[in-house]
Amino acid sequence: MTDLPAPPIAATRPYSFTTHGVTIDDPWAWLKDPDYPDVGDADVLAYLTEENAYFEAVMAPHRPLVDRLYEEMKGRIKEDESSVPQKDGDWLYWTAYETGGQYRRWWRKPVSGGPDELLLDEPALAEGHEYFRLGAFSVSNGGSLLAYAIDDSGAERFTVRVKDLATGEHLPETIEGMLSDIVWTADDSGFLYGVANDQWRTDNARFHRLGTQVGQDVELYREADEGYRVAVGETSDRRWLTIETGDHVTSEVRLLPAGDPLAEALLVAPRLPGREYDADTHGDMLFIHTNDTDTQWRLVTAPIASPGEWTERIAPSPHFYMTGIALFRDFFIVEGREDGLDQVELHRYDPAVAPTRIAFPEASYSAGLGDNPEWAMDVLRLGYESMVTPGTVYDYDVATGSLATLKVQEIPSGYDGDRYRTERLHVTARDGTQVPVSIVYMLDEDGGDFPRDGSRPLYLYSYGAYGHAIDPGFSTGRLSLLDRGFAYAIAHIRGGDDLGQQWYLDGKLEKRVNTFNDFVDVAKGLIDRGWTSAGRIAIAGRSAGGELMGAVVNSDPGLWGAVIADVPFVDVLNTMLDAELPLTPGEWPEWGNPIEDEAAFRLIRSYSPYENVTAQDYPPLFISGGLNDPRVTYWEPAKWAARLRATKTDDNVLLLKTNMGAGHGGKSGRFDSLREAAEEHAFVLWQLGADG
């Protein structure tokens, strides 16, 4: 790599602190601007700018490959893509892109017939902004008003506006700093929302009455526990407004009459440590989805008049993980996973009627309810895809049980699914646990199978935190790797809830290292089966998945040929020790509280990627961050990159790219984000010698 320009070297400044009798040296602590979230420190900005310039210089010879990949990926996107219209009341609603457009427009038309009506023009709102994201979007019950929220920096502090859909004019009120959904009252006189406090936590629910000053908005609820977040919503029948509060392990729900938001709230069930639940209503009954007796969850009912009198409706199952319920007038839907695969079941309110499970055509797939806004539905909208099947929209006829295909994701440049195969494997982890792996690959031109002789490169992706499952879905961008001989695998490691909530519990807190071990063991298992070989594996993870990347490059650097770590949560110890950071108190149930718990301190210190960088050879690394990111603050990837540069013993390339006008999600426009994906794929192909 001697032909590359010299990388930036971040200065070191003496800094240390002592916790639980252990002194921690952190010579790159200065990269955290003391005025954050305002980042104006000249030295910090100079270093990030220097790293960005280095990134551009190193990638410059590979720009033709980036451009080629970008055009491939863009060619697989239908530029004038539109969603399938869905009925809600007197209107049909849909969204659509125009050719060349980065953002979509929101449309509707009368069910009875009439012209299309433009509700919201995202391209116009995004014009002149480096970043744009639409947050909440809520049409009033009567259909005459639209409340929506936008973020134009990536900081996830949204501005709310209200539009009169009859005149096209905006009402005078503007709400700054919103971080929630928007839910209208029954009479459309106002709406519920929540604002972020100084620590970027939504600790409140408020009611805004149209025509009044925002400063006069009524605070309906305030949460005292700094680790809890507040959310607003509504029941499926729209008779009740909901105020929900909770952290990662405990929750609590209150109901307000949709016609009287200032009434006294009805508490469904008081919070109990470790008990989570969500609630919906049908007639005079509550339907409560909860993990109070089992990690597989169950469904109970209770009279709204006596919300504490729970009666079990569906017991927990050792094989079926109930992830949620959706109520409709004549039936309800139970969603879940059986042995890690999505299932959708239709239940009648009469418990004597056996449920119906909707059948899907493949052995490995991702499926679930789509947009179903009305209470009285007789045809359900479903979404379906697999690693070889593009996204498909179905209508399911409740009476006949038939599936009607409304739309299949169009790939303008062409796609032949018969050229690809997907498999679901199991790899034995070091403690004997069977870890599922979803894998996809392209057949040889003569139809021959993927060779299992270790000669091919493999791209391995995972997340492994917060009980977030990674579904085996479809990706057009992934095809650029498959078409160049890669296999692409998803490791369904512990820490996600792919196999149920216990799978999640077995990868958090004191069991966190299971997540890292599972990932490494999956890689070794795939090597043993001939899918690839050591040094021929590209790995990728984002956010908490970036923490995973940091941990496994420390523990097993020789396995990986290239590493993509996007907005990586790698400074875990310092972040969990800083109670003033936006996310920290709410994250302690996930990672542990190292301030009060010495055992948690020592465990986090033992695996925190930043703390455990050592003098050894590391694989090539592509690290990204966002200056305005409130979730993984920009200094985490910056500090990690600085320590790696100063410590590692190899000459492999290390790149740090910081989006100076974006947040956790990177670039916001669909083509801008596509170019970022092309850069990452180009890096992988370059490092693994497959850049044809």
Image (cartoon, helix red, strand yellow):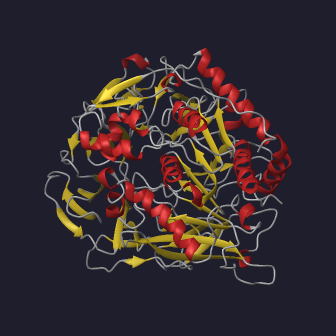
User: Where, by quadrant of the figure, is residue 514 drawn?
Assistant: bottom left
- The quarter of the image holding the N terminus is top right
- Image coords of residue 99 (percent x, y): 80, 48
Q: Is residue 537 visible?
A: yes
Q: Nearer the viewer, residue 57 or 201?
A: 57
- Image coords of residue 329 (percent x, y): 37, 62
- Image coords of residue 515 (percent x, y): 42, 58
Residue sitting at x 78%, y 39%: 4
- 79 versus 656 height, above or below: below
Q: Is residue 382 visible?
A: no
Residue sitting at x 23%, y 38%: 265
Q: Nearer the viewer, residue 676 or 311?
A: 676
User: Where, by quadrant of the figure, is residue 483 drawn?
Assistant: bottom right
- Image coords of residue 511 (percent x, y): 32, 56
Side (left or right) of 610 relative to 479: left
- 572 versus 200 height, above or below: below
- The quarter of the image holding the C terminus is bottom right
Residue sitting at x 77%, y 52%: 79
Q: Nearer the viewer, residue 616 or 476?
A: 616
- 23 versus 253 height, above or below: above
Q: Nearer the viewer, residue 355 or 488?
A: 488
